[in-house]
Amino acid sequence: SYDPTNPTGLYESSANWGRGSMGGMEAVIARRGCSGNGFEFRYWGLYPEACECATGYAADTALGGLSQVNFGGGTAFDAFNAADYHTFYRNNEFQNFEFNLLHCGGSANCGRTNWEWLAGFRYFYFNEDFSYGAFGSDPGFPDPVYYDLVTTNHLYGFQLGGRSEHFVTQRFG
């Protein structure tokens, strides 16, 4: 959305929204033999504390593609430009599940720095909901009008990798 009377033009954009923080968790169950080889189950997820929401008043839309959506004698673009205000809503969720076989690659510095190879399976889930709404008092357009996007990705596959860790003390690395 933008304000045509503002010299900079920009009023509100989803690119302006900074997610302060997202709560999450990680859990790992692992088993290793005396050789250092083993397996692990790993889960982590990020969960929004609340949606990102905003409201813009006396704004026009910059989404020219809305002119391709016709209804009631007008277009969605016209309805957004005739609106008294716009609303924005965005919500994200991430989840990751892994199963890895671990192979000890060796150690240096008397065992304080270790490295290992891993091979396994990963499933990654991502969901984003976005809604852009127009609310107005113009009798020629319905109230409200929404432009909604929902994206859900289920990604899975085989993975190969390596990692290292360095221990400052026996219990801190």
Image: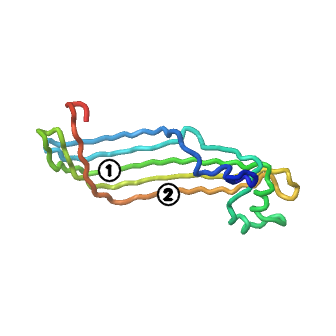
Amino acid, disc 2: Asn
The disc placed on residue 117 is none
Position of residue 141 in the picture relative to residue 128 (left or right): right
Q: Is residue 173 above or below residue 80?
A: above
The three-letter code of the residue at mark 1 reads Phe
User: Seen in the image, is 120 located left or right of residue 49?
Assistant: left
**SS category of the residue bearing label 1:** strand
Image position of 47 (left or right of 133): left
Residue 153's disc number? 2
Question: Which mark is nearer the camera, 1 or 2?
Answer: 2
Which quadrant does the C terminus fall into? top left
Q: Is residue 64 above or below residue 148?
A: below
Q: Residue at x 17, y 38 (%)?
A: 112
Q: From the viewer's perspective, is residue 121 above or below residue 28? A: below
Expressed as whole percent of the image width and height from the top left, the position of residue 116 reads 21, 49
Query: Where residue 32 sits: x, y (%)?
Result: 20, 42
Q: Nearer the viewer, residue 173 or 46?
A: 173
- Name the outermost residue toward the bottom: 68
- Using the image as rendered, state which of residue 156 and residue 136 is in the foreground: 136
- Which numbered marker is on residue 99? 1
Circle 2 SS class: strand
Residue pictured at 73% horizontal, 66% vertical: 67
The image's colouring method is rainbow
Residue 53 figure quarter:
top right
**N-terminal label among 1 and 2:** 1
